[in-house]
């Protein structure tokens, strides 16, 4: 006589996101990321990844952050296409374009906001981290180091947040060339917070949707 499997023995299967869910997810995630980056830029801070590189360059040259963000991420398309295929690459390209567009929108709508540096750094990184989680869970990234971190997680089993944290450290250290040391120190704490959000919430095998 066969015995029905216990509820604890049943493994839940992932439920695929619909096209509408993916579209809304990317819109929501990139909007939240752009808002976080706007807060960072408003206090003259930096963060890790290509977003941090774009912020650094924006402090040195008179070009909109949205354009710089797209330019900095351009070389990573080759890596994404080579390792992740067209679907992921096109989604990532769309996400980058949306972050660039929303960054321009944030600047136009909010203008020159004034917030304390520590608040701007912490709130900006938390928002960017939450936005990245949403983007990741809809099979995309915002380019750059996100692609490298996701590849390391999928191929090597390393947590994306920890990989990104190591890469971000190098970028934050570069900020010492253009940003005051105190602001860099606060920025380093903020970047660590962003990656902690990713490490705690984006683990291999935990999220079953795709």
Image: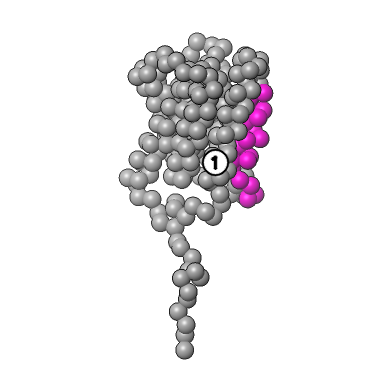
Q: Main secondary structure of the magenta part?
A: helix
Render colour scheme: one colour
Would you say 25 lies left or right of 49 here?
left
Identify the element where label 1 is drawn.
helix
In the rendered view, does 100 fall on the left or right side of 155? left
**Which percent across, then down, holds residue 3?**
47, 82
Vertical position of residue 199 compared to residue 36: above or below: below
Residue drawn at x 56%, y 12% is 60
Crowding at dot 1, Cα within 10 Å, few <14 / some 14-19 / many 20+, comes out as many
* Residue situated furthest left in the rendering: 20
Point 38% across, 44% down: residue = 22
With respect to residue 153, does 96 lie above or below?
above
Can you see residue 168? yes
Residue 149 showing in the rendered view: no
Residue found at the very far bottom of the displayed protein = 1
- Which residues make up the magenta segment? 156-173
Total count of labels: 1
Position of residue 203 measured from the top left corner of the image (x, y, whole percent) = 56, 49
Residue at 47% in and 85% down: 2
Instruction: Name the foreground residue: 131 vs 81.
Output: 131
Q: Position of residue 1 (x, y in %)?
A: 47, 89
State yes or no: residue 150 in magenta. Answer: no
- Residue at coordinates 34% horizontally, 19% vertically from top-left? 109
Q: Position of residue 183 (x, y in %)?
A: 60, 18
Is residue 171 magenta-colored? yes
Q: Which residue is mark 1?
A: 198
């Amino acid at each position: 006589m066969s015995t029905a499997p216990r509820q604890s023995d049943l493994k839940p299967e992932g439920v695929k996101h619909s096209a509408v869910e993916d579209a809304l997810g990317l819109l929501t995630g990139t909007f939240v990321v752009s808002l976080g980056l706007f807060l960072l830029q408003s206090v003259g801070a930096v963060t890790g990844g290509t977003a941090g590189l774009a912020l650094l360059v924006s402090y040195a040259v008179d070009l909109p952050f949205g354009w710089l963000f797209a330019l900095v991420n351009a070389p990573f398309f080759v890596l994404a296409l080579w390792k992740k295929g067209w679907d992921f690459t096109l989604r990532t390209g769309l996400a980058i374009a949306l972050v660039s567009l929303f960054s321009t929108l944030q600047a136009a709508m909010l203008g020159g906001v004034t917030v304390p540096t520590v608040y701007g750094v912490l709130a900006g990184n938390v928002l960017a981290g939450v936005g990245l989680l949403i983007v990741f869970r809809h099979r995309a990234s915002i380019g750059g180091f996100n692609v490298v971190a996701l590849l390391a997680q999928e191929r090597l089993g390393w947590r994306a947040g920890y990989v990104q944290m190591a890469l971000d450290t190098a970028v934050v250290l570069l900020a010492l060339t253009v940003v005051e040391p105190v602001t860099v120190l606060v920025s380093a704490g903020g970047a660590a917070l962003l990656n902690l959000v990713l490490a705690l919430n984006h683990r291999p095998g935990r999220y079953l949707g795709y």
